[in-house]
Amino acid sequence: MVKKLFNPIKDKSGEIIEFLMSSPDIPADSSIQFKIRLSIEETVENVVNYAYQDGVGWMEVSTDLDDKGLQLTITLKDAGTPFNPLEREDPDLTLPAEERPIGGLGIFLCKQFMDKVSYSYENGCNVLTLQKNIA
């Protein structure tokens, strides 16, 4: 497991994303890396930009590979405003882009690219967990 606490997170999206993507738990397969990176970018940006009203707060991130090396788990934890992104309705992709409401596409893509995305609110913290089967 690789874990790091970022405090404050304001203006640190790039640093957090690069930390996660440089983890030895991330597979070498470039097509899987693309899906993981996009999912990480979308979720990290959401926390950095919206979790804390004043933009100053912390985020703990981690990657973990199961014992068999088959499943990657990425966890994002923050103490910002409680928000479950999975409760948001998926965008209607049949509508032209200009007719769709802004927002929601990133978490939709994350749900498409990862094998499991879950949210919990524990001890005053948002916990978003992304899982990807990598074998």
Image (cartoon, rainbow, N blue to C red):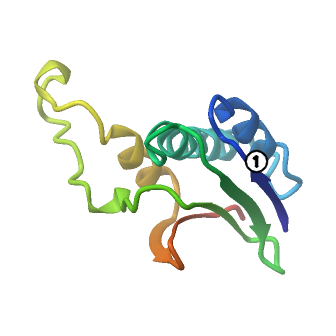
- Image quarter hosting the N terminus: bottom right
Q: Residue at x 74, y 48 (%)?
A: 6
Q: Nearer the viewer, residue 77 or 85?
A: 77
Residue 4 placement: quadrant? bottom right
Q: Residue at x 74, y 71 (%)?
A: 70
Left or right, residue 120 beside residue 16: left
Is residue 26 positioned above or below 38 on the image?
Answer: below
Q: Nearer the viewer, residue 109 or 87?
A: 87
Q: Check disc 1 and report the residue beneath it.
A: 20
Q: Circle 1 — which element?
A: helix
Q: Residue at x 36, y 56 (%)?
A: 85
Image position, residue 34 (x, y; %): 63, 38
The amino acid at mark 1 is Leu
Image position, residue 12 (x, y; %): 69, 33
Residue 53 placement: quadrant? top left
Image position, residue 61 (x, y; %): 71, 57
Q: Residue at x 41, y 56 (%)?
A: 81
Q: Callout 1: 10 Å neighbours few (<14), some, many (20+)?
A: many
- Image quarter hosting the C terminus: bottom right
Image position, residue 26 (x, y; %): 79, 52
Is residue 87 positioned above or below 18 on the image?
Answer: below
Residue 101 placement: quadrant? top left
Left or right, residue 55 beside residue 6: left
Left or right, residue 6 beside residue 48: right
Is residue 45 positioned above or below 39 on the image?
Answer: above
